[in-house]
Image (cartoon, rainbow, N blue to C red):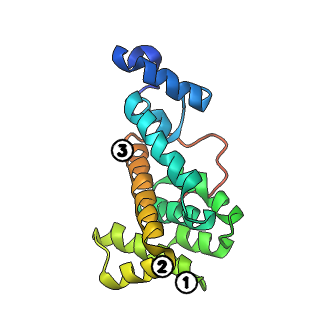
Amino acid sequence: MARVPAATRESVPQHQQHAFDAVVQSRGGVPRTGPGSIMIHSPEASRRASHLSEYLRRESTLPSHVQELAMLVTARELDCQYIWNAHAAAGKKAGLSPELVDALREKRPLPSLQPIEEAVIRYGQEFFRTHRVSRGTFQTAQEQLGVQGLTELTMLMGYYGMLAFCVNAFDGDLPSERTEALLPV
């Protein structure tokens, strides 16, 4: 159960009610689970974050399987059940092997990987575990993705890190229709 009650138009500051209305309209209702249900408590910040999300998810130069892999690496490294549940099936649909997804979830040795997959995983794991990226890991990721792609990968992982922080800190609820096995944490 989440640590704060669901936001309502009346629970947000009056000067942000227009932003609350915009978020609700864009989402088709007040978000009840996940990071959206938390971020709407600061409607203007939520509205602005959605612009970044829209770019990173819909206009980025990163292929969809790389985006999904980046989200899964972030979810796994930050033990975020919600993001894992939201993206494990999508990752497989985008072309990630079920063996890779399962190995990430279980923190088992990874199967044979494409060079771009290996670069993304190593880049994310190294950053989340050490708070830095070594020169070699950076160089390999840049060779696979280019400067713009690596910049977008970094921003995507950072954005999903923010979402994981919101969900984990506020103890956000998983959707009732979850489809994926829980992360062993």
Query: Percent x, y for residue 129?
Result: 33, 70
Residue lying furthest left: 131
Instruction: Work out whether residue 106 or residue 63 is closer to the camera in this orientation and state it.
Output: 63
Q: Secondary structure at mark 3?
A: helix
Q: Amino acid at mark 1?
A: Pro
Q: Are marks 3 and 1 in contact (CB under 8 Å)?
A: no
Whole-Å distance between the Cαs marked 3 and 1? 34 Å
Residue 63's image quarter?
Answer: bottom right
For label 3, the residue is 169
Closer to the eye: label 3 or 1: 1
Question: Could you tell me the amino acid type at mark 3?
Answer: Ala
Q: Relative to residue 48, is residue 103 depicted above or below? A: below
Q: Residue at x 61, y 74 (%)?
A: 100
Percent position of residue 158, x then y: 39, 57
Q: Are marks 2 and 1 in contact (CB under 8 Å)?
A: yes
Report helix, strand or loop for mark 1.
Answer: helix
Label 2 sits on residue: 119
Judged by depth in the image, the label closer to the viewer, 2 or 3, is: 2
Q: Secondary structure at mark 2?
A: helix
**Could you tell me if residue 182 is visible in this image?**
yes
Q: Could you tell me the amino acid type at mark 2?
A: Ala
Give the Cα separation between the discs numbered 2 and 3: 29 Å
Q: Earlier in the sequence, mark 2 or mark 3?
A: 2
Residue drawn at x 57%, y 74% is 103
Q: Check disc 1 and report the residue beneath it.
A: 115
Quadrant including the C terminus: bottom left
Relative to 132, residue 1 above or below? above
Q: Residue at x 54, y 31 (%)?
A: 31
Where is residue 105 shown, x and y percent of the image? Answer: 54, 67
Q: CA distance from mark 2 to mark 1?
A: 6 Å
Is 80 or 155 nearer to us in this picture? 155
